[in-house]
Image: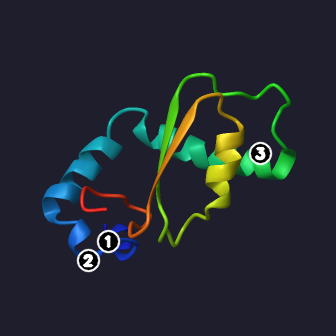
Amino acid sequence: MAQVRSTGRPEAFPASVTDRYLEAWTQPGAARGMLNWYRATRYGLLFGQPKDARIRVPVQIIWGQQDLVLEWGLVEASRALCDDVRVRAFEDATHWVDRKS
């Protein structure tokens, strides 16, 4: 969890929060779902998106503008694939958007 703590505000990860993350991440299929988003992004960057690739269900993207890991261009690339998307960007949030963002 030290790596997670280093990417956010110091007070963002008390033990109660990291315990909940660990509980969620250890559920069956959770890690696969999280990694598939990154894989899909990489696949699209390397090979281009299929012409019919569309996300037709409503999507909400929550983004921390102080993210040290991902860049804003991923929001725009994701938005271009969605029929119905809402983006909520938090100016002071990092990669880990929390309630205080």
Disc 3, SS: helix
Horizontal side, residue 30 vs residue 69: left or right: left
Horizontal side, residue 73 vs residue 44: left or right: left
Q: Please provide percent x and percent y for residue 95.
A: 44, 63
Characterize the local packing of mark 3: few (<14), some (14-19) or many (20 or more) Cα atoms within 10 angstroms.
Answer: few
Residue linked to disc 2: 10
Who's the residue at 65% across and 44% down the image?
78
Q: Please provide percent x and percent y for residue 72.
A: 61, 61
Horizontal side, residue 15 vs residue 71: left or right: left
The quadrant in which residue 55 appears is top right
Q: What's the amino acid at mark 2?
A: Pro
Residue linked to disc 3: 44
Q: Are marks 1 and 2 in contact (CB under 8 Å)?
A: yes
Q: Earlier in the sequence, mark 1 or mark 2?
A: 1
Q: Please provide percent x and percent y for residue 30.
A: 41, 38
Q: Earlier in the sequence, mark 2 or mark 3?
A: 2
Who's the residue at 81% across and 38% down the image?
49
Characterize the local packing of mark 1: few (<14), some (14-19) or many (20 or more) Cα atoms within 10 angstroms.
Answer: some
Question: What scheme was used to colour the molecule?
Answer: rainbow
The quadrant in which residue 97 appears is bottom left
Question: Of circles 1 and 2, which is in front?
Answer: 2
